Amino acid sequence: MFLKNCFALLLLFFSVHARAQQNLPDTAQLFQDIRVLSADSMAGRKSGTEGSRKAQRYLEQRFKQIGLTAYNKTYKQHVRLQKEKLVVEDAINLIGYIPGQTQEVLVVTAHYDHLGQRQASIFNGADDNASGVGAMLAIAAYFKKHQPYYTLLFVALDGEELGLQGANAFLNAPPVPLHNIMLNVNLDMLSINSKGELYASGSYHYPWLLPYLQQVKALPHAAIRVGHDRPEQGPQDWTNQSDHYQFHKRELPFIYFGVEDHTHYHQTTDTFENINRPFYADATALVLDFIQIVDQQHRPKPNQQK
């Protein structure tokens, strides 16, 4: 019995290790995406600016390269944003999907807008949130080669910095019925952390997701920490801090992956040169592992399928 138990544990270890190794992203492409999106030529990607339009064109090209399917022959969802006196008539969400074996949908979101340019200073937004978009693209590329059970919908959102308005517009006119959305995985700031901590926020509200998070094994440069989602935490409760809040308001489950604030947050120093590359690569792999676990284990057993 002892040997049998040891053998079972070894099989489990090697299975987890193999999955973690398999899920390591194409780091060259991952770093290229964050480098391009946070370049000075994008001028901080502020909604409604030429820098934002450059980012849109780049993301549309990447969606095509990966092979994501478009709804109604276009990746673009035209939305109107307004915050106080600022109105953006030509904002764009970019939406692509990979069909699964069910109509149930897992939505992966990451906002591509940032603060833009103020006089001569560019707020490049490498961590916030070129990093989330780069990770989303890496995850999409993986599942394009490994068909998922759930339909996976990938959304590059505009207008997060204007009050989560791009996410609100997406959910007000979704390409799939809201009742088909079983989970939102939101990626916002994944590339700068000195302690190797990637937080997963949301399981306090949706505890059925906690066992899936607990199965994600740490990698050399990053590990998942659960938290920042309890009301008593006040400002440290991240429930309403990014686009996932629009899903939560509609009672749609979410997990938000991100890092704690750092010295580069909303500063001109949030540049590609200051990201933590080993951490970012491992953080992306951890998110991918979580989605894969949910996709594999939350599906019905063969004898439960209709």
Image (cartoon, helix red, strand yellow):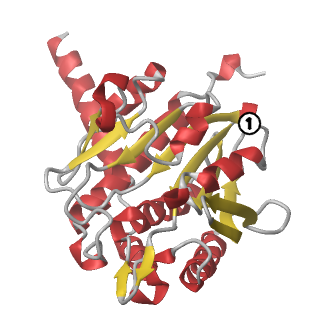
> Mark 1 = which residue?
178
Question: Could you tell me which residue is drawn at 59 percent across and 85 percent down?
Answer: 50
Question: Could you tell me which residue is drawn at 48 percent across and 42 percent down?
Answer: 292
Question: Could you tell me which residue is drawn at 26 percent across and 53 percent down?
Answer: 261
Location of residue 239 with respect to 108 vertically, above or below: above
Q: Quadrant of residue 115?
A: bottom left
Q: Is residue 292 visible?
A: yes
Location of residue 281 with respect to 4 vertically, above or below: below
Location of residue 155 with respect to 186 vertically, above or below: below
Residue 9 x/y as whole percent: 23, 26
Q: Nearer the viewer, residue 132 or 214?
A: 132
Q: Nearer the viewer, residue 127 or 29?
A: 127
Question: Could you tell me which residue is drawn at 51 percent across and 35 percent down?
Answer: 254
Location of residue 214 with respect to 16 vertically, above or below: above
**Which amino acid lies under the numbered mark 1 shown in the image of this protein?**
Leu
77 left or right, relative to 45: right
Residue 173 x/y as whole percent: 78, 49
Q: Is residue 215 visible?
A: no
